[in-house]
Image (cartoon, helix red, strand yellow):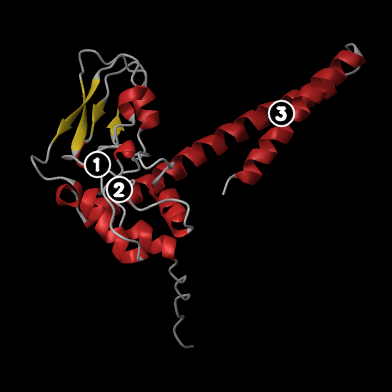
Amino acid sequence: MPPLEPPPARPATLADAIDAVLPQTQCTRCGYPDCRHYAEAIAAGQAPINQCPPGGAEGIRRLAAVTGAPVLPLNPAHGVEGPRAVAVIDEAWCIGCTLCIKACPVDCIAGASKRMHTVIEDDCTGCELCVPACPVDCIAMLPVTGTRTGWDAWSADQAQRARERYAFHRFRVERDKRENDERLAAKAQAKLADLAQHSTLADPEALERKRAVVEAALARARARRQETP
């Protein structure tokens, strides 16, 4: 039997090519929820190439080379180019609320509820999303690249690692949501069974109202599972 051949690679799109030269910090400063959405907006002609402060001037030149668009100065409405920074948590003030953990797009903050958190510096992309999430203002951004900015302060390897960590973060969030929905659905099914068992011992109209509420919750859970990729 001849050896199996791998399936053909999916043809690269313009959005793929654009996404490949974005820094993958997932900071949302471009006005989109992540780098991929910004890449798709550029490819569709819905966004210019000068909205990415982490990429800086070099990032704009790379985007211009991919898209054929003219080089533009960075739009100050989206921020300014500067040294790369990492998040630092003041452990004395951290209350362990976990809000920064939820805000981090690459899961680089370690901690537990009501316990002190810390940032894994090597994995931090400097997105700053944890800063406004902190209710006690105990997170600061510390520059770590001196005078180097944009792609001089970042690398292709770091961008790829950030892309992979963001992909896993999204997978984890969806998995946790799905598992929580399944737990709630199981409880609802058990409640329905209990209602059916006691239907002859209680007010039928009250039981029917409860059954309608539970069945509606089950329908919502099924709909969410169908929407989850």
Q: Quadrant of residue 184?
A: top right
**Residue located at (16% from left, 47% from top):** 153
Marked residue nearer the N-terminal end (1 or 2):
1
**Residue located at (46% from left, 52% from top):** 41
Residue extending farthest left: 146
Marked residue nearer the N-terminal end (3 or 1):
1
> CB of mark 3 within 8 Å of CB of mark 2?
no
**Residue count near mark 3 (Cα–Cα under 10 Å), binned few <14, some 14–19, many ≥20:** some
Marked residue nearer the N-terminal end (3 or 2):
2
**Residue count near mark 1 (Cα–Cα under 10 Å), binned few <14, some 14–19, many ≥20:** some
Q: Helix, strand or loop at disc 1?
A: helix
Q: Position of residue 21 (x, y in %)?
A: 30, 58
**Residue located at (31% from left, 43% from top):** 75
Find disc 3 in the rendering and name its residue. Answer: 217
Q: Position of residue 78 (x, y in %)?
A: 33, 38
What distance separates the C-alpha of mark 3 from that of mark 2? 37 Å
- Which sits in the foreground, 140 or 91? 140
Disc nearest the viewer among 3 and 2: 2
- Which sits in the foreground, 55 or 215? 55
Q: Quadrant of residue 28?
A: top left
217 up-or-down from 26: above or below: above
**Residue located at (40% from left, 48% from top):** 167
Find disc 2 in the rendering and name its residue. Answer: 162
- Which sits in the foreground, 104 or 43? 43
Disc nearest the viewer among 3 and 1: 1
6 up-or-down from 60: above or below: below
> CB of mark 1 within 8 Å of CB of mark 2?
yes
Find disc 1 in the rendering and name its residue. Answer: 123
The amino acid type, in three-letter code, at marker 2 is Ala
Q: Position of residue 221 (x, y in %)?
A: 67, 35
